[in-house]
Image (cartoon, rainbow, N blue to C red):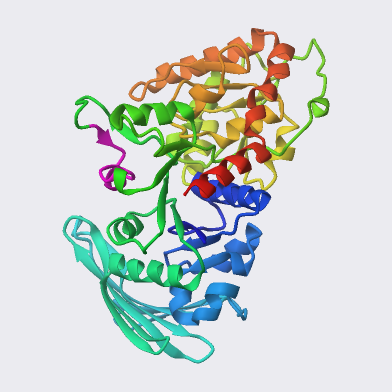
């Protein structure tokens, strides 16, 4: 069985989850079986699954497995309950019990306390210190564990007790040992060798790299820039999300990288490992015929700009807002619509208000159908300083939208061809004004370019990212394991 292993998924997801969904689509096309595996205790998992159209039997959650048993592993949750949460607070207002019933039939009881922050003694924080999980149908307690303060790693899960799991009571000192048992259990439940595609989670890497099931294969998926710097060539400084696994790179069977540029960069540090590092895009476009591409008016000039991403600091949406404001007097008809949701929402709104740009820059919220939304726009903008792949770039180009973005590693450099399907601009991590000016310069180039020619090149530039092509690449990889 092929297991796509991640920590969690939710109603709103990152590029990691969307890469998993796309991989599943390719596996379906190629006829390859798979299961999504999530290791965190996700309280709204089945609501998220419904949102993203995942069937119950496609998903295995670690905690639901230990509560609901063997049948769940094959068929998913057998019964649905109303999802609800209640909180009881003691009379001193220092302790509380938070009870959550999940729609899959778990009763999660979180023991919480209010205490002084260790970093700021003038601040009170509410945190959980113990969790119990019951089978809601039988009210049997199935799991209990503790959260322990760690001086260097904040809180760690420890002392995990599991009761009456296939007739045995189990104890695990920490989460790594729990996951190790869980993955060996999954391996035993499915015929054939297991392929673990690790999308996120150092605990998962620790559990599997040093004690994998016999005949299994480990495949790590890189979703971002792996490198912080290579100032000392013999000791590259890795992105901390990949540091553990890259320091043990040869203990994994395959590494999947979404762009050839990033693969070549990795081979600088791992010479002779060309077969271990494989390029397979983490996103793509539905198959099409050349006849599907519309002929565009020769005199068309762009006025409608769009960006779509999580509203997160690393996306630098405020740079786009300031660039559009800088050019508003010269191009008063131009508008920018921002699609997405996230923690930077309030900050972006404040920038729009500060610049009095509300008439031509608008936040449009989340969209489940960007493919249709793109048809309403002319140009795609991105101010991200790092894109491991850039799925939105491919989707925009496929919709006929040229791109203005920064020349960041690796997706932008691989997908956007200067003057052919868009424009790449320099940026500065320390001087935002420089980045704003360069983005404005790129938009000006777009306004003055032969726009119909740029649009004519967009879909042709991403033809190799059609679903059938990428599905075949996954087929070849799995067959070779």
Q: Position of residue 251 (x, y in %)?
A: 30, 48
x and y percentages locating residue 420 in the rendered image: 62, 13
Residue at 45% from the left image edge and 69% from the top image edge: 186
Magenta-colored stretch includes residue 406: no
Q: Which residues are magenta?
A: 236-249
- Lateral position of residue 170 relative to residue 71, left or right: left
Q: Looking at the picture, does residue 179 appear above or below residue 358?
A: below
**Within the image, what quadrant is residue 202 found in?**
bottom left
Membership of 240 in magenta stretch: yes
Q: Nearer the viewer, residue 249 or 163?
A: 249
Q: Is residue 359 in view?
A: no
Tell which residue pokes out farthest to the left in this image.
Answer: 151
Q: Quarter-wise, where is residue 291 in the image? A: top right
Above or below for 256 versus 42: above
Depth check: 197 or 106 in front? 197
Query: How far across and how far down the image is residue 355, in percent?
Result: 53, 26
Up the image or down, 321 lies above or below 162; here it is above
Numbered label tally: 0
**Residue at screen point 65% across, 12% down:** 447
Identified at 54% across, 37% down, the residue is: 281
Q: Nearer the viewer, residue 155 or 114?
A: 155
Q: Is residue 73 visible?
A: yes
Who's the residue at 58% across and 62% down the image? 48
| Whole-percent x, y for residue 267 in the image | 35, 29
Location of residue 94 (image quadrant) = bottom left
């Amino acid at each position: 069985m092929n297991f796509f292993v991640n920590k969690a998924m939710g109603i709103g997801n990152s590029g990691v989850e969307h890469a998993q969904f796309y991989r599943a689509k390719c596996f379906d096309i190629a006829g390859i079986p798979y299961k999504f595996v999530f290791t965190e205790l996700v309280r709204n998992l089945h609501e998220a699954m419904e949102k993203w159209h995942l069937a119950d039997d496609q998903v295995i959650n670690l905690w639901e497995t230990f509560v609901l048993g063997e049948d769940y592993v094959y068929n998913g949750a057998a019964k649905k309950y109303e999802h609800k949460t209640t909180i009881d607070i003691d009379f001193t207002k220092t302790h509380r019990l938070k009870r959550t019933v999940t729609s899959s039939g778990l009763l999660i009881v979180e023991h919480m306390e209010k205490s002084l922050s260790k970093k700021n003694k003038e601040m009170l924080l509410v945190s959980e210190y113990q969790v119990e999980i019951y089978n809601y149908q039988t009210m049997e307690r199935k799991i209990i564990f503790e959260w322990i303060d760690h001086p260097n790693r904040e809180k760690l899960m420890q002392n995990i007790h599991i009761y009456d799991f296939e007739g045995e009571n189990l104890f695990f000192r920490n989460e790594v040992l729990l996951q190790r048992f869980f993955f060996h259990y999954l391996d035993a439940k499915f015929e054939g060798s297991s392929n673990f595609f690790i999308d996120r989670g150092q605990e998962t890497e620790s559990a599997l790299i040093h004690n994998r099931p016999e005949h299994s294969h480990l495949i790590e998926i890189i979703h971002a820039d792996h490198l912080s710097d290579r100032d000392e060539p013999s000791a590259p400084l890795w992105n901390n999300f990949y540091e553990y696994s890259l320091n043990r790179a040869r203990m994994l069977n395959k590494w999947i990288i979404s762009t050839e540029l990033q693969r070549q960069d990795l081979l600088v540090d791992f010479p002779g490992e060309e077969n271990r590092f494989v390029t397979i895009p983490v996103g793509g476009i539905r198959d099409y015929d050349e006849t599907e591409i519309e002929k565009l008016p020769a005199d068309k000039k762009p006025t409608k700009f769009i960006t779509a991403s999580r509203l997160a600091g690393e996306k630098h949406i405020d740079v786009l807002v300031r660039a559009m404001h800088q050019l508003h007097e010269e191009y008063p008809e131009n508008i920018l619509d921002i699609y997405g949701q996230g923690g930077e929402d309030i900050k972006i709104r404040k920038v729009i208000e500060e610049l009095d740009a509300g008439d031509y820059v608008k936040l449009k919220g989340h969209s489940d159908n960007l493919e249709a939304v793109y048809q309403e726009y002319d140009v795609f903008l991105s101010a991200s300083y790092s894109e491991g792949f850039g799925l939105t770039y491919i989707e925009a180009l496929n919709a006929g939208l040229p791109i203005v973005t920064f020349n960041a590693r690796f997706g932008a450099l691989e997908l956007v061809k200067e003057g052919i399907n868009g424009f790449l601009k320099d940026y500065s991590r320390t001087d935002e004004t420089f980045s704003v000016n360069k983005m404005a310069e790129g938009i000006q180039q777009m306004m003055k370019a032969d726009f119909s020619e740029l649009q004519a090149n967009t879909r042709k530039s991403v033809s190799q990212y059609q679903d059938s092509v990428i599905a075949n690449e996954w087929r070849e990889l799995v067959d070779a394991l």
